[in-house]
Amino acid sequence: MSEPFPRLCLALLLGLAAACGPPQRDVPAADVPKLASLSELMDAQATVADPQMKKAGAATYADADYAAFTELSSRIQATSVKAKEFSKGPGFDKLADQLHETAAKLGTASAAKDAKGSSDALAAMKATCKECHSKFK
């Protein structure tokens, strides 16, 4: 067997594994109202939020992080409003409102380049997401 064959197999397996992950939906805030299902909405949220929420707890952030947090704030504010169109009841709506408020706090903190405020908002957003998923997923 030639050496390129195992590399090709490995590349194919890695490609298939990546394709099996959650769908990536990079949806700008202005296009969030066009999402047609809660599943699409959650995929859009995860695409933008998951990489940023991993940064919660850092003591400092770079300018690029603050820019990403500002974008995250905008998108999560849009998705949290849209989520209520797919409501699963008052508890779901309350968590959507909570997520919206925390996303607004992230926007304020990131505009001020406030590392602690940004970190706290990211952690609170992550906690809200986990709570909602544990109750309604």
Image (tube, rainbow, N blue to C red):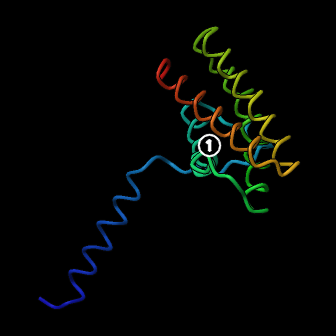
Residue drawn 55% across and 23% down?
A: 132
Say above or below: 50 vs 136. Answer: below
Q: Residue furthest bottom?
A: 2
Q: Position of residue 97 (x, y in %)?
A: 73, 21
- Camera-nearest residue between 96 and 83: 96
Q: Residue at x 31, y 70 (%)?
A: 12
**Mark 1: which secondary structure?**
helix
> Is 133 displayed left or right of 41 in the figure?
left
Residue at 81 percent of width and 34 percent of height: 104
Instruction: Name the residue carrying label 1.
Output: 44
Q: Amino acid at mark 1?
A: Ala
For this view, does 4 lie left or right of residue 77?
Answer: left
* Mark 1 neighbour density, 10 Å: few (under 14) some (14–19) many (20 or more): many
Q: Quadrant of residue 42?
A: top right
What x and y, as percent, mark residue 43? 56, 41
Observer-nearest residue: 108 or 40?
A: 108
Q: Position of residue 70 (x, y in %)?
A: 79, 48
Quadrant containing the N terminus is bottom left
32 and 3: which is toward the camera: 3
Tell which residue pokes out farthest to the left in this image.
1
Residue projecting furthest to the front: 59
Q: Residue at x 20, y 90 (%)?
A: 3
